[in-house]
Image (tube, helix red, strand yellow):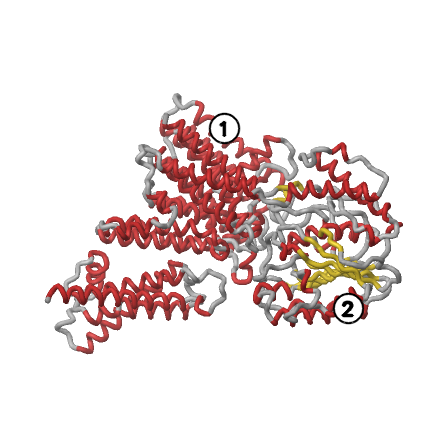
Amino acid sequence: MRMYDHESGNNLLNLVFTLMEFLVSTILVYLVAVSFGAYLIEDFLATLIFSIFLSLISVMPFLIMIKHKSPIELLERLLFRQEYKTNIEQALSRVSRGSIIGAWFGALVIPLDWDKWWQKWPISCIIGAVVGILVSLLINLIKLKKKVKLDS
Amino acid sequence: MRYVSVTILLVNIIASIYVFSNGFLIRRISLENSSTRSYPSLKKFNKSIILFIDALRFDFIFGNKNGLFGIQILEQLVQEGEARLLKFIADPPTTTMQRIKALMTGSLPTFVDAGSNFDSYLVQEDNIISQMHNHNLSVVILGDDTWLSLFSAEQIHEHHTYPSFNIKDLDTNDENVDREISKFFTLKPHWNLLIAHYLGIDHCGHSFGPNSPVLKRKLTDINNSIKKVIDLMDNETLLVIVGDHGMTETGDHGGDSQLELETALIFYSKKKNFIKKSGIEETRQINLTPTLALLLGIPIPFSNLGIVIDSMFDNRLDSVSANYDQMVKFIRTYESHERLIDDIDGLKSAGDSEELKSILVKIQDACRLKWSTFNLSFCLTGLVNLAFSILNLSLNKDKNINLKFVISFLCVYLALSLLNHNYQNVWIYTIENFILSLAFVIPFSNSYIIRENNSLRFLLTTVLFHKIYLCRKKKDSIFRPLACLILIRVCHVFYVCREELLDSCSQSIFAQQISKSSFSTRVYFVFFIFNFMFISGVFFVIKTKNSTLNLFLSASLLILGTYNFLQILSKDSTVIKYPQLLLARLSLLLFTAQKIFAYSSIKRISKTNRFFFINLSVVMFASLVLGESLLSVWLLALVLHLTANDDLVFLFLLEHYFFYATGHETTFTHIKWESAFHGFDGDNNNKLVRVVMALMIISNTFAAKIVTLLNIVKKGEKKMSGNLLQFFVINATKVFFSALSVFVLRRHLMVWKIFAPRFVFDGIGLFTSLFFSIYFFCLN
C-alpha cells in the first residue's frame, strides 16, 4: 500500500487517494458479499449497489474523518485491536459495526417465500444496515450523554 | 461405569427416535399385483368425464348468507333430482398428490408407500389409469401436471398439463383446460376417460382465503365450465364432478379438520333413469374408485379399499360381491407381507348385500386405523424421551461435554450471555452458539429447508469471518479460514436442484450424474483426469518403502482407474458391461481383503503399513462409491485438514453443509441409487448383497458425515471419545429439532413433501453417525 501522509499532501491528491481507497473497499465488500452467497456475475448491479452503499457508510467515514497513513493500519487498529484514540473514532466504528450486523440480519429474510418487494437482494440488507446505523447512533447518543455527565 | 451410562443414553436416543417415527411416519407396503377380473354385466358407460375441482369444499356448492359461495348449475341440478350429490369425505393427508393417488388406486396413501422403486413418485399400484390402458381404453388428462408425475405418459393417450406451483396464478390453468376440453367434444371425440383438473379454487384459497370476493369469481368460472361440459356431452357419457379436499378458514389444507376433509361428489348423466336416489348421503372418497371402475367395466384396482356405492347399480348384490372378492383377495395378499386385521377368518362370504357391505366397512376401518392416523402419544413420548436423553448426555460429568450446547438449545443463551458481565469473552462463544441455534431452527421453515444449502453456507461464512476476526486480533495468519472460505464458496457448483426451485436453479456439469447426464464425453474425461490425479496423489502420499506393498497398491489403483475409465466409456455401449462388473467386484474384493488384512494382523504389521492399508481401503471404497461426488468430498477433506479437530460447532456445520455440497438433497428422488450398482446387477435377491448395496448407498449419501467423523478420530487421539460423544450430541440435537418441527407442523401443507423427508434423512444420518462413531472408536 501507499505510504502517504494525509496531513502534508495537497487537497487534490488527498481526494484522489481517498477515492482510490473507497474503490478498493467497494471491491472488498463485493467479494465479502459474494462469499456470503451473492452471485459473482449474474446479479452484478444489485451486488454492486450494495457494496457501494455498505462501503460508503461503514468505510468512507473513517477515510474522511480520521487522519491516517495507511488504511490497512487503520482497519487493523479500529476493527481488530479496538484501540480508539478519540471519542469520534469509537462512535464511528460503532456505527460501522452496526451497519454490518444490520445487513447480516437483513439477509436472513431473503430465502423466505413471502413474496414481498423488500425481500429482494439487496433491499432487505440495505434496510437492515440502515436500522443498524440508527440503533448504533442511538447507542452513541446515550453513551455520549453519559460521558458529558461524567465530565461535568 | 461411565461407559455403561453413556451406552444406555445412546440406546435411549435411538429408541426414542424409533418410537417417534413409528407414531409419525405411517408406513404401508405397496403391492404391484393387478386385478384381471372385470364385470361386463355391471358396465353402464363407455365414456366418462371427471371434472376434478381442486379444493371444492362441500359448502361451496350451495349459496350462503354472504352470497360468496354457490355453484348455480349444480344447485339447480341437485334440486331438480337430475344429478346426485354426495358428501365426499377425504382421508388425511389432504394434499392433492395423495388424494389423486387415493382416488385412482382406491387405497389409503401414507407418507412412505414402501415399494420397489423410490426413484420417482410414479404410482406403483394397480389403478384406474393403468386398467384403462390395459383394456385399450384411452385416457385424456387436462390441467394440473401432478398427474404426469404420478402416472407414466405411456398410459395416457393425450395430455395437456400446466404447472401448479404458482399459487398466485388463478386463471391460466383453468382457461387452458376450458379451451382444450371443448376440442375433445368436437374435433377428437375418441376417448373413454377424460380428466380435467381445475386449480383455480385451490390457488384462490391459498392466496386469498375462502372468504374473499375472488372466490366468488372463481366459483362462477367453474359454474360456466361445468355448464359448457353439460351442454356438450352426449347421452352415453357419465359426468363425475369431484373435489379432492376442502380448505380451512385460512384457505390451507393438508390436515384432518372437518373443513379440509369434506368435499363434494356429483354424478350426472343424460341417460334416462340413471339417478334413482335423492337426498345427500355421505361417502368416503376412496369409495368412488370401485364404483367408477365397475361403471366403466374395468376391473377394480387390486389394492382398492373403497366400498362400492351400490345404489348406482341395478344389481346391487353383484356390485357388492365383486367388490368383496377383490378386497378379500387384496387383504389375503397383503397379509403375507404384514399383519393387518386380527380376525381374518371372520371375513367369510355371506349372502346378503348389507352383510357383505358391513364386512367391507370392517376391513376399511381396520386399514384406516392403521394407515391414516398419527399416533400422538408415540410422537410425544419419543420427543420428550429424546430431549431428556440429550440433556442427560450433555450434562454428563465428563468435562468434555460442554454445557453450552444444552443452553444454546433454546436459543436463550444469547440473551443470557448478554447479561453476563464478562462481556468480551462470552461474546466469542455466543456468536458460534447463536449460529448453531440458527442452524437448528432451519427445519421450522420450508423456505429455509428448500434453500438449506445456501442458508448453511451463509452461517458457515459467518463463522469463518468471525474466525478471521479472531485471528487478526491475535495477529495470527488468516490463511486457514480464508482458504476454507474460498473452498466452501466454490462448492456451490455441486448443488443439485430441488423440484421446488427448478425454474430458478440450474445444475452445473459437476453435479450431473455420470450415468444420467447428456453431456459430451469430454466432460467425463475431465472427471476421469481429476479422479486419476486424486488417486495418484494418494499414491505419493501413502507410498511406502516396501516394494511388494507398492506393487499391490499400484495394482489396486490400476484396477480402480480402469474401472472408472470403463464407466465413462460404457455410457454408449453395453459391450463392456461384463469386464466392468468384473473389475468393480475385483476392487470390492481387494477393499475387503485390505480391511481384513489391516485389522486382523495388527500386531504382525508395522504401524505405517497399517496406516497405509486403512487409507488405501478408504480411498478405494470412496472412489468406487462416490462417483461424481468424489471431487467435493476431496474438497471437504481439504477443508477439514485446515480446521482444528475440536472445533465441533464448525465441524458440525461443515458436515451438514457438505451433505448438500456433495450433490445430495433431502428428497427421496435425489438419493443416488446407482451408487449401489458397482459390481452388482439390478436384480439380486441375495440378502448379503442387499446389505452391501445398502451400505454403499448410505456411504454415498452420508459421505460428508463419515469423512468428518474419520477426521475427528484421526486427529484428536487424546480427547477422541469425548469429542465423538459431543459431536454425536450436537447431531442428536439436530434430529430433535427436526422431529419437533415435523410434529409442530404436522398440519402444514408441505409436511409430506418437505419437512418429513428432511426428518427421515436426519434420522438415518444419526444412525449412520452412531454406527460409524462406534466403528471408528473400536478401531482405535
Q: Position of residue B698 (x, y in %)?
A: 52, 40
Mark 1 against mark 2, which lies toward the viewer?
Answer: 2
- Toward the viewer: A77 or B203? B203
Q: Which residue is mark 2?
A: B76
SS at mark 2 in the image: helix
Q: Position of residue B626 (x, y in %)?
A: 50, 43
Decide: few, some or many residues near mark 1? Use Cα within 10 Å; few <14, some 14-19, many ≥20.
Answer: few
- Toward the viewer: B778 or A99? A99
Which residue sits at x=71%, y=68%?
B71
Which residue sits at x=39%, y=31%?
B611
Find residue A40 and report its image quarter.
Answer: bottom left
Please tell me whether residue B354 is drawn above or below residue B197 in the rendered image: above
Residue B339 located left or right of residue B420:
right
Which residue sits at x=47%, y=68%?
A116
Please tell me whether residue B220 is drawn above or below residue B353 in the rendered image: below
Which badge, 1 or 2, comes first in the chain's sequence? 2
Q: Amino acid at mark 1?
A: Ala
**In the current view of this chain or complex, which residue is farthest to the bottom?**
A12
**In the current view of this chain or complex, which residue is farthest to the top?**
B604
Can residue B698 be seen at all in this image of the molecule?
yes
Q: Amino acid at mark 2?
A: Gln
Can residue B533 be seen at all in this image of the molecule?
no
